[in-house]
Amino acid sequence: MDHYYNAKDLARFSEIGEEAGPLWQKFNAWYTAVFAGGALSEREKALIALGVAHAVQCPYCIDAYTESCLENGADTEQMTEAVHVASAIRGGASLVHGVQMRNKAKQLGM
Amino acid sequence: MGRVLPTLQKQHAPLASGAEQRATLATVPLARSFKEALAQSSLYPLRATGVDILQINVGKKCNQTCRHCHVDAGPDRTEMMPRDVMEKCLEVLATTDIPTVDITGGAPELHPDFRELVARSHAIGKHVMDRCNLTILLLPNYSDLPEFFAEHQVEVICSLPHYRAKQTDSQRGEGVFDESIEALHRLNAVGYGKPDSGLVVNLVMNPVGAFLPGNQASLEREWKRELKHRHGIVFNNLYTITNLPISRFLEWLEESDNLEGYMTRLVNAFNPGAAQGVMCRNTLSVGWDGQLYDCDFNQMLELGLAGDGPRSIMDFDIAQIRHREIVVGPHCFACTAGAGSSCGGATVT
């Protein structure tokens, strides 16, 4: 194995259930229910998932939810905006800690 | 209308031939064959359950050259159903209890006898469906079609891959979206899609790329909201149809290096419930030259009916056709993936 990520491994996701079948089945049932249409549409959920996939930087999730967004009628303009939302939260999350930095600096400074 | 491309036939491309398409599909490594998938679901051999729909392909001429077209239709195609074949189709309809006529092409409205086929089918009590590309309704000599459709209670099934222009024009040609919206306004103006009008207009969406369509009910809700909000358009149902890996879509899959991945996706998504309800089980497809097929896709792959029964509508015999064995191949995985796919959209709810 000369690299950590292989696109074909996504199709092998269910192998993780081989050592813990009941847990995998519970995860699978819950996961399927989460993405079913409800108060949010399947397209909206796919766009949220795509944003989160970028925030957690999971290449499998990015592949999977790019396809899911397209299947559910989203276009690349909408998907790009979803990635910007994820990026803005990541960037903002770093930046807002600047207040903590300023608090500590103020405490330590004269 | 903007882009019109030469067809595969005009380019003398190898994939213009059904045999070459079948040979190309045969090179794709699959985890199991379609026959094996059917057998593992106790559905092999797949048999017809009857003939509820006579789907008549009146010709390959079209005013558009969509990139995914399974017919390789376009302005340069000249195949048109001859008069004697059309008369025989009408005779079959008149002498059987087949309730529905599904007229397709190309752009079927371009056939000089299209209106006669519709009018006479309606006059003998058949339900008539027309597979319309929408832009045809804006051409000179065709702008009165909405009124004609309404007069004959034609169910109009229109292609529109997305409610936004970018995807629609990408698949169907530059400017097609705006013309399609105008055509839908004209259909709405005569009552199509309006409550209590009895006039039905359904939209068909094919994915614009190498992926499956999403949940049909969910997409329909969104399309109704967006088309109403953006353009004031109403329609009855949205049908999601999976792209078949044949003809121009097959060419694109090969060129974009998506063929194996797409076929794998289709095979992995095989749904026995969808296989149970495939459209070929209650449809009979007639080619422009009268040859008979299990579906319009088999027609384009030049896969005629199996067995000792009639090969042409000219030798039609319902008894030999009603429960025929369906001819299948790897392309059939497109109709059985996920929620299934047919000319009436998803087959599993």
Image (cartoon, rainbow, N blue to C red):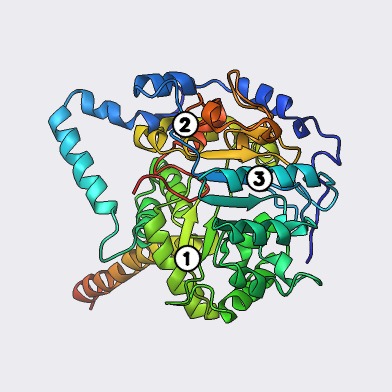
Q: CA distance from mark 1 to mark 2?
A: 48 Å
Q: Residue B17 appears at what percent x and percent y?
A: 76, 30
* Mark 1–mark 2 CB contact (< 8 Å): no
Q: Residue B225 appears in which quarter of the rendering?
A: bottom left
**Label 3: few (<14), some (14–19) or many (≥20) C-alpha neighbours in 10 Å:** few
Q: Which element is circle 2 on? A: loop
- Looking at the image, can residue B344 be seen? yes
Residue located beneath label 2 in the image: B48
Looking at the figure, which quarter contains the N terminus of chain B?
Answer: bottom right
Q: Amino acid at mark 2?
A: Ala
Q: CA distance from mark 2 to mark 3?
A: 22 Å
Q: Amino acid at mark 3?
A: Glu
Residue located beneath label 3 in the image: B91
- Tell me the residue at 72%/48% (across/down): B58
Which residue is at the front of the view, B105 or B231?
Answer: B105
1 or 2: mark nearer the eye: 2
- Looking at the image, can residue B173 be seen? no
